[in-house]
């Protein structure tokens, strides 16, 4: 693996939908355990790279840096995709699944298809499946029977109630 400059233009900032919060992707990548190690190695090949998780190892050959210092992953014949640090992964999912602008609570496959055009991380596929299954709005869509929804609510409430009681007990 050597430094290759990506020819594609990729975003260097990510704005959370519905907020004014804008994240510097390069900076978030530096803070990420695996992506940080890969970036430091690319910038200084004597840096240790043994510690990266096995999920990233198979993608090392596809990695390069954009001109703004953003790590990208590129598959043959496709545009470069920004490598997403763990801290930003739920934000990317939300912006393509449940945001007011880009969401719409589509199936996990559709959501993954849209997000994959610009972004990448190794466990993207299982994560999108898991988070779609956990999405409350999607659960209600799959199971619109009101009495069953009530039952789910009761379970959650009593669970919270017992946590609260425990907390008071400790105080
Ligand atoms: Zn949903």
Image (tube, rainbow, N blue to C red):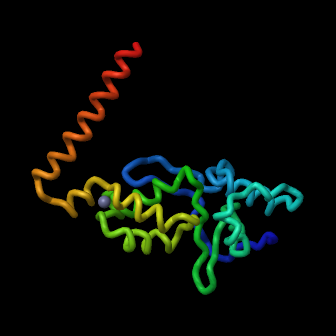
> What's the residue at 43%, 64% (across, down)?
128
**Left or right of 57 on screen, residue 79:** left
Residue lying furthest bottom: 77
How far across and how far down the image is residue 29, in percent? Answer: 64, 54
How far across and how far down the image is residue 94, in percent? Answer: 40, 57
- Residue placed most toward the observer, 124 or 113: 124
Number of callouts: 0
Quarter where residue 13 is shown? bottom right
**Left or right of 41 on screen, residue 113:** left
> What's the residue at 14%, 46% (across, down)?
150
- Residue placed most toward the observer, 157 or 47: 157
Q: Quadrant of ligand 1?
A: bottom left
> What's the residue at 57%, 64% (across, down)?
121
Image: 131 above or below 168? below
Where, quadrant-wise, is the C terminus in this rendering?
Answer: top left
How far across and how far down the image is residue 68, in percent? Answer: 68, 62
Image: 25 above or below 77? above
How far across and how far down the image is residue 12, in percent? Answer: 60, 60
Quarter where residue 43 is shown? bottom right
**Left or right of 78 on screen, residue 54:** right
- Residue placed most toward the observer, 9 or 86: 86
Image: 31 above or below 43? above
């Amino acid at each position: 693996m050597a430094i290759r400059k990506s020819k594609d233009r990729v975003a260097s900032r990510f704005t959370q939908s519905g907020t004014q919060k804008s994240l510097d992707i390069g900076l978030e990548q530096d803070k990420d355990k695996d992506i940080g190690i890969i970036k430091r190695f690319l910038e200084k090949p004597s840096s240790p790279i043994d510690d990266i998780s096995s999920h990233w190892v198979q993608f090392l050959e596809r990695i390069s840096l954009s001109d703004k210092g953003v790590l990208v992953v590129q598959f043959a014949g496709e545009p470069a995709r920004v490598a997403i640090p763990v801290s930003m992964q739920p934000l990317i999912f939300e912006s393509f699944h449940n945001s007011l602008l880009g969401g719409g609570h589509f199936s996990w496959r559709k959501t993954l298809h849209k997000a994959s055009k610009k972004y990448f991380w190794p466990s993207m596929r299982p994560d999108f499946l898991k988070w779609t299954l956990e999405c409350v709005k999607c659960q209600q869509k799959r199971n619109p029977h009101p009495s069953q929804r009530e039952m789910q609510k009761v379970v959650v409430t009593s669970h919270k109630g017992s946590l609260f009681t425990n907390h008071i007990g400790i105080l």
